[in-house]
Image (cartoon, helix red, strand yellow):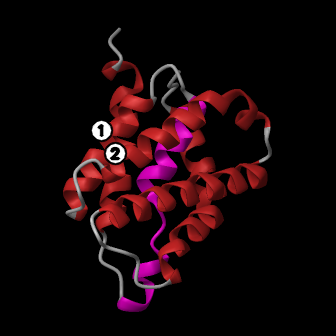
């Protein structure tokens, strides 16, 4: 049975939904509160199925974010590939943590992503306007338990392994 038939479509659909949530219009006051949906979905699948979702998936998801956000090509790709690599190398430990501790790890990984984005923007002469640049990592940390439960239930329902 091919990977796409054995849950690959569900994994791909979860990334598409995360990308759509990243593009969903928000009011001006909430723009800086937008969670890093694609990164969180990537962290979940790298943790749950490291043999199927890894650095390559992170790179591709990051390239899509680069194109969608109009960012320097490779900026988010580098950040998400690094997040996927760290998650992949720690997946056995992360699975054992309770969800609230996983939230803290997600916060650290997303702060690393934001730091890499700032670093790349610094090379091209851009810088973040305010400290609000760091807020998506914190909102993602708060939403991680719900996203974890939802994706775990989807994985169990469709018997993805």
Callout 2–callout 1 Cβ contact below 8 Å: yes
- From which residue to which does the magenta span run? 28-48
Q: Using a 10 Å C-alpha cutoff, classify the residue at mark 1 as few (fewer than 14 neighbours), some (14 to 19) or many (20 or more).
A: some
The first of marks 2 and 1 along the sequence is 1
Residue 13 numbered tag: none
Q: Please say if 36 is above or below 1.
A: below
Q: Please tell me whether residue 133 belongs to the stretch shown in magenta.
A: no
Q: Please say if 82 is above or below 71.
A: above
Q: Residue furthest bottom?
A: 29
Which is nearer the eye, 142 or 76?
A: 76
Mark 2 or 1: the one toward you: 2
Q: Quadrant of the N terminus?
A: top left
Measuring 43% from the left and 45% from the top, which residue is drawn there? 80
Q: Please tell me whether residue 42 belongs to the stretch shown in magenta.
A: yes
Q: How far apart in space, not on screen, are marks 2 and 1 (Cα)?
A: 7 Å
Q: Using a 10 Å C-alpha cutoff, classify the residue at mark 2 as few (fewer than 14 neighbours), some (14 to 19) or many (20 or more).
A: many
Q: Position of residue 83 (x, y in %)?
A: 51, 43
């Amino acid at each position: 049975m091919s990977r796409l038939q054995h849950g690959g479509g569900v994994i791909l659909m979860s990334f598409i939904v995360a990308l759509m949530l990243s593009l969903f219009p928000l009011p001006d006051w909430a723009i800086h509160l937008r969670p890093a949906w694609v990164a969180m979905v990537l962290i979940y699948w790298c943790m749950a199925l490291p043999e199927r979702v890894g650095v390559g998936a992170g790179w591709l998801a990051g390239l899509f974010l680069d194109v969608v956000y109009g960012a320097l090509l490779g900026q988010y790709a580098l950040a998400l590939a690094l997040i996927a690599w760290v998650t992949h190398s720690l997946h056995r430990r992360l699975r054992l943590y309770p969800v609230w501790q996983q939230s803290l790890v997600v916060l650290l990984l997303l702060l690393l992503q934001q730091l890499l984005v700032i670093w790349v923007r610094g090379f091209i002469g851009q810088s973040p306007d305010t400290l609000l640049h760091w807020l998506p990592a914190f909102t993602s940390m708060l939403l991680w338990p719900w996203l974890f439960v939802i994706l775990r239930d989807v994985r169990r329902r469709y018997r993805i392994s």
